[in-house]
């Protein structure tokens, strides 16, 4: 780990180009990396479970200001013919998996829990669904074009629980190195769907 490699510059901004506030380790960088590995593994595994093609998934740490370490992660994917609800649940899965890992590991301090919250993932889900003419709000609405984030999040919690062994397997390798989607699928014992959504 050293200064940020320029090839990861895109990982430090959200879908609008706004810079993330990266996790800066007052605790050990290893603990931060494990949490973010579970976050990205949650995205990757649910992508595959919902029929989305995972391109790459990874985390990167670098020496930031004041000689402290910062860490961010990224999972890139593409899909066709995937339900809007499923896309939103995949977006929620990163935070859900990260928080579950913190609770199970006894690391769910206020600081770590706050750092695990991923508003950018919800905002990305809102933007993706809006392109399909679907609104994503806290409580949804009466039509199929109005989806409830509460229901999405609850579904993500259940799917993450169901797929926890696969998420854990991917995270255990992801903490050490970046993975292609096919590598992540092999580790999880899953199939990485084609970009056309076929298993």
Image (cartoon, grey):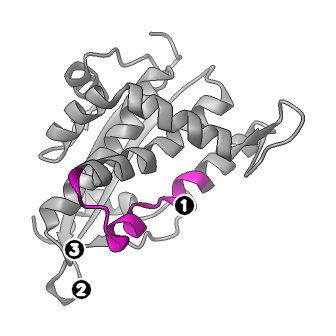
**Which residue is at the front of the view, 20 or 190?**
190
121 falls in the magenta region: yes
Which range of residues does the magenta coloring cover?
105-122
Visible in this render: residue 189?
Answer: yes
Residue at 52% in and 43% down: 91
Residue at image position (38%, 39%) is 42
Residue at horizontal 22 percent and vertical 19 percent from the top: 186
Q: Quadrant of residue 38?
A: top left
Q: Earlier in the sequence, mark 3 or mark 2?
A: 3
The residue drawn where x is 32% and y is 67% is 112
Q: Main secondary structure of the magenta part?
A: helix
Which numbered disc flags the more N-terminal residue, 1 or 3?
3
Q: Residue 32: x, y in percent? A: 22, 62
State whether residue 10 is above or below residue 90. Answer: below
Q: Secondary structure under badge 1?
A: helix
Q: Which mark is residue 65?
A: 2
Which residue does the numbered mark 3 point to in the structure image?
25
Q: Residues within 10 Å of mark 1 (few under 14, many from 20)?
A: few
Identify the secondary structure beneath mark 2.
Answer: helix
Label 2 packing within 10 angstroms: few (<14), some (14-19), many (20+): few
Which quadrant of the figure has residue 185? top left
Between residues 189 and 106, which one lies in front from this camera angle? 106
């Amino acid at each position: 780990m050293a200064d940020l490699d320029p090839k990861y510059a895109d990982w430090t901004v959200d879908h609008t180009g706004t810079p993330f506030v990266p996790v800066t380790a007052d605790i050990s960088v290893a603990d931060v990396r494990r949490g973010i590995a579970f976050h990205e593994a949650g995205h990757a595994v649910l992508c595959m479970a919902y029929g989305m093609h995972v391109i790459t998934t990874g985390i990167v740490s670098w020496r930031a200001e004041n000689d402290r370490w910062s860490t961010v992660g990224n999972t890139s994917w593409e899909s066709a013919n995937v339900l809007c609800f499923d896309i939103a649940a995949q977006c929620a899965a990163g935070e859900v998996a990260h928080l579950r890992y913190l609770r199970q590991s006894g690391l769910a301090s206020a600081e770590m829990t706050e750092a695990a919250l991923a508003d950018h993932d919800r905002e990305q889900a809102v933007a993706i669904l809006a392109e399909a003419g679907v609104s994503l709000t806290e409580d949804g609405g009466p039509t199929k074009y109005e989806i409830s984030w509460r229901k999405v999040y609850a579904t993500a919690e259940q799917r993450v629980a169901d797929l926890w062994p696969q998420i854990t397997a991917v995270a255990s390798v992801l903490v050490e190195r970046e993975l292609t989607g096919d590598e992540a699928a092999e580790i999880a014992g899953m199939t990485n769907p084609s970009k056309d959504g076929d298993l």
